[in-house]
Image (cartoon, rainbow, N blue to C red):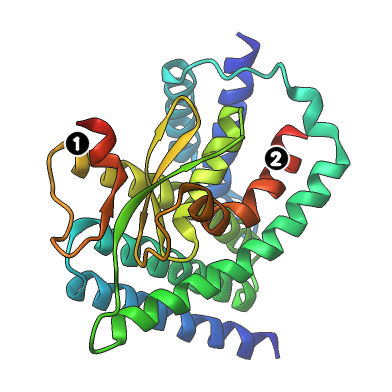
Amino acid sequence: MANKIILFLLSYLIWLLLTWPFDFSTGQINVQAIVAGFIASILVAMIMREISYHRLARLFNPLRYFWFCVYILVFSYYLVKSNLDVAFRVLHPDLPIKPGIVKIKTRLQTDTAITALANSITLTPGTLTVDYRNDGYFYVHWIYVTTFSQEEAAARIIGRFEWFIHKIFEG
Amino acid sequence: MIKYLGIALLYAGVLFDLIGCIGLVRLPDVYNRLQAATKCVTLGTCMILAGTILMTTSLILAIQGIICLVFILITSPTAAHALARGAYKAGVKLWDKSIVDHYGEDQS
């Protein structure tokens, strides 16, 4: 129950920030938006599965935030690099691509960490997560396959992120 | 100064969005097209939002921009992953010049 209330408050706060029904210069308040948001947030809180907060203590570990900030910087660099890479391949007259789906193994365990890693893979150089198998394997679509070896591919695709994500979510 | 940085970000964002759309047309199959669609369009849209955040004078607009930025960064790759997996399960073949398919090998 407590989880649902936290979820409700969170979604209601985001709704209020996004619609912003208060106009301070004229003092008017858009009641319609406030009531609609209230109903929508209750629905969201009821439908959503209970999120477990038993690892809540981890949220207060400042070291995680430090690694998260470092990760944002590293990630931004690779995000821009991957975009230039894809832009180059798209605009090149010969379309230099060599696509394929490769399998890589990850040592991450928790759901949050795996989700973060999957999203990082999708947003970085030429790779797109297709599926994840419960025994720790990712299937990744790679726009320019440079190696067939599983270990080599893992090192090239997730080697630079796995360590960070392990530090942030599991360390 | 900040205003010009914002304008530069806007232009770069539009450019990346354009490249993403060109990729969507030029690349051969669903999976390659998703690559262009997710990467270029995500960064392009984030840059446009960042430019707006820098240029606006309203605080609430900046907060809304940051919320949208975070949502796009989370949802765009998730949607791409769902589309790619759905396409594969529905039997969409890889491009015939694809060189490796471990996913198909493991399923058969």
Decide which of A135, A65 is in the foreground and name it.
A135
Question: Up-down: is A160 above or below A86?
Answer: above
Question: Up-down: is A100 above or below B53?
Answer: above
Res A101 label: none
Read off the residue under disc 1.
B89
- Farthest residue to the right: give it: A62
Read off the residue under disc 2.
A166
Residue in the image at 59% along x and 33% along y: A112
Decide which of A19, A151 is in the foreground and name it.
A151
Decide which of A121, A152 is in the foreground and name it.
A152
Q: Say which amino acid is labelled 2.
A: His
Question: Up-down: is B8 above or below B95?
Answer: below
In the figure, residue B103 lies in which quadrant? Answer: top left
Q: Say which amino acid is labelled 1.
A: Lys
Residue B108 image point, x, y percent: 19, 31
Helix or strand or loop: what does disc 1 sit on? helix
Residue in the image at 47% along x and 66% along y: A125
Badge 2: how crowded within 10 Å, few (<14), some, or many (20+)?
some
The reply to whether residue B4 is in sight is yes
Residue A77 image point, x, y percent: 62, 71
Residue A121 image point, x, y percent: 49, 53
Report in which chain the residue with disc 1 lies: B
In the figure, residue B99 lies in which quadrant? Answer: bottom left
Residue A107 lies left or right of residue B10; in this view the side is: right
Residue in the image at 38% along x and 67% along y: B41
Q: Distance between the residues labelled 1 and 2?
A: 30 Å
Which quadrant holds the N terminus of chain A?
top right
Badge 1: how crowded within 10 Å, few (<14), some, or many (20+)?
few
